[in-house]
Amino acid sequence: MRILCVFLGVLVVRAWALVLPTITMPPCDSPEAEMAAGVFQDYINAQRTSGFKYALNQIDEIKIIGTPNMEIYKMEIELLETKCHVLDPAPVTACPVRTKAEIAVEADCDVALTKTGGVLTVIEHRCKSEPETSTEDICVGCPHLLPLNDTNALQMTTASLAVFNSRTANVSLSKYAILEVGRLTTQVVSGAPKLFSEYVIVETNCTTTEDDNCVPLNQSMATYGFCTSGNVIANVSVDCRIFAPQQPVVEPAQNGTIPLLMIDMTGQLSAESVESLDPVKQASIISIVKRQAPAAGTVAPGGQSNTMPVPVCPGKVKFF
């Protein structure tokens, strides 16, 4: 009977050792941390349908929970807004990041990914975005953000698009309509206030000589563009760059991941619904994360030390 009890005790200890997750905290600038952050950067830019692309600025924290079937990455990541709209096909590496003087916008994200078969997948994330700092702390006369419903700035935006459409009338291009106003700013230039606008345009079924009943073309057929405009008093300037036709957007539900939950600088959610994972997979992940590992410095069943090295975090700042 005593031998049997000892045997059962050994089986229990070994079984516990098999299910106990391992926890590692690699340096924030390690290749595995950079790879996971890069996957999230690409994911967040691909999932968003409005606003500007984000570029990785710093990895603040990373913890990897190892299980027999997968690794779970828990990360804190800082992103910075670029000047490329999400519809711009340019890779994010080619997109300049806004400077502090241009009212840089920072997004702080809590991210969870899984790694199975060498493939990293974003399963959960929450981001909060806000201006990186006030321009008053940087320079006198720097631009200031305006609300996206500012009447004067929107009137200037509409006038600038009319200027662009009139330019293209001589080359038989379609008429464009405003799809989204991404940013409105004001700045004092030579003693006079100047308005600036950044907005996205979409091709319509009208030619530039037609004015009424214009409807944007289907996404698979339409071309899009990005315009910057400004004015001093009544003089309006505009510069637009037209993109290639866009590919259909892949819905988040089709790739099994959770869509972006971005909180803007006003504190409002820009995406209110969150797709759920498969209940079985979700329960498995939650149980693994909640399971407690032995404290640092103790020895887990099987004689393996659970001492974790001091993490080297946060990582280096890529921009500012």
Image (cartoon, rainbow, N blue to C red):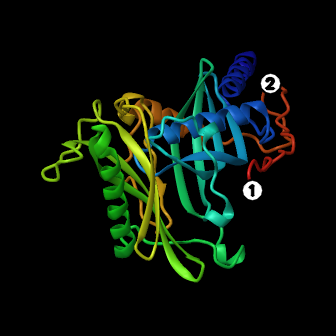
Q: Secondary structure at mark 2?
A: loop
Q: What's the residue at 71%, 36% (across, down)?
A: 34
Residue type beneath disc 1? Phe
Residue 260 lies, in percent from the top left, at 46, 46
Q: What's the residue at 63%, 22% (across, down)?
A: 68
- The numbered dot on residue 302 is 2
- The numbered dot on residue 320 is 1
First-in-chain label (2 vs 1):
2
> 93 or 72, which is in the foreground?
93
> 317 or 113, which is in the foreground?
317
Residue 84 lies, in percent from the top left, at 53, 46
Residue 209 lies, in percent from the top left, at 20, 47
Badge 2 local density, few (<14 within 10 Å), some, or many (20+)? few
Asked which quadrant contains residue 20, the reply is: top right
Residue farthest toward the front in the current orientation of the protein: 170
Residue type beneath disc 2? Gly
Q: Are marks 2 and 1 in contact (CB under 8 Å)?
A: no
Residue farthest toward the left in the current orientation of the protein: 213
> 231 or 148, which is in the foreground?
231
Badge 1 local density, few (<14 within 10 Å), some, or many (20+)? few
Residue 10 lies, in percent from the top left, at 73, 21
Location of residue 109 with respect to 249 vertically, above or below: below
How far separated are the C-alphas under marks 2 and 1? 46 Å
Mark yes or no: residue 236 visible.
yes
